[in-house]
Image (spheres, rainbow, N blue to C red):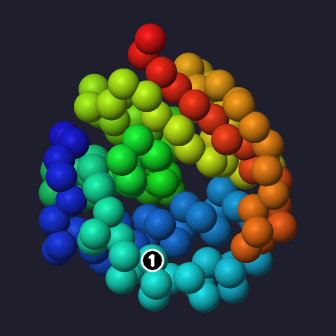
Amino acid sequence: MIRAFKINDLNSVMKIWMDSNCTAHDFIDREYWEANYISVKQVLPEAGLWVYEEMGTIKGFLGLDNHFVAGVFVKSGEQSKGIGKELIDKAKETHQSLSLKVFVKNTRAVQFYKREEFEISDELTDENTGEREYVMNWSNQ
């Protein structure tokens, strides 16, 4: 079931955020994610978040800032089960267009977004990590 984020979800969501980032972005030092943990934990409750919950356990979440997908995060061991797709579909239900940034080296995520009909529109360098990233867009028009 997908539902809106509640403040008591914060610890579960942050564990998924940290674990997912460290796993998917093994080309970025873990210290980068650890250094950003507290600031992300402070701003996350203000973001538009949808969580995927099953039998009382949060298995993934999606962050939205207007039409910008700040991230899709799925708990380790729960990936490739359709959770990310359901979260993206939820965002598509409420928006005519979506955009996001994804690291070029995160090939699994790039392929996922391409399958979900996002198209690469630009390639930039992330100023915080120095890593290349794609700007990807989706529109229902």
What is the quadrant of residue 100 in the picture?
Answer: top right
Position of 19 with respect to 132 (left or right) is left
Whole-percent x and y of residue 79?
49, 44
Q: Residue 108, can we see it? A: no
Whole-percent x and y of residue 127?
76, 69
Residue name at image x 70 percent, y 61 percent: 25
Image vertical order of residue 12 relative to residue 60, above or below: below
Q: Residue 141, can we see it? A: yes
Circle 1 packing at 10 Å, graded few (<14), some (14-19), many (20+), is few
Whole-percent x and y of residue 8?
17, 74
Residue name at image x 21 percent, y 42 percent: 2
Image vertical order of residue 112 relative to residue 126, above or below: above
Position of 56 with respect to 33 (left or right) is left
Position of 130 with respect to 13 (left or right) is right
Quarter of the image where the C terminus is located: top left
Q: How many marks?
A: 1
Image vertical order of residue 115 relative to residue 84, above or below: above
Position of 115 with respect to 6 (left or right) is right
Front-lying residue, 96 or 8: 96
Residue named by callout 1: 40
| Amino acid type, mark 1 | Val
Quarter of the image where the N terminus is located: top left
Front-lying residue, 4 or 98: 98
Residue name at image x 31 percent, y 77 percent: 11
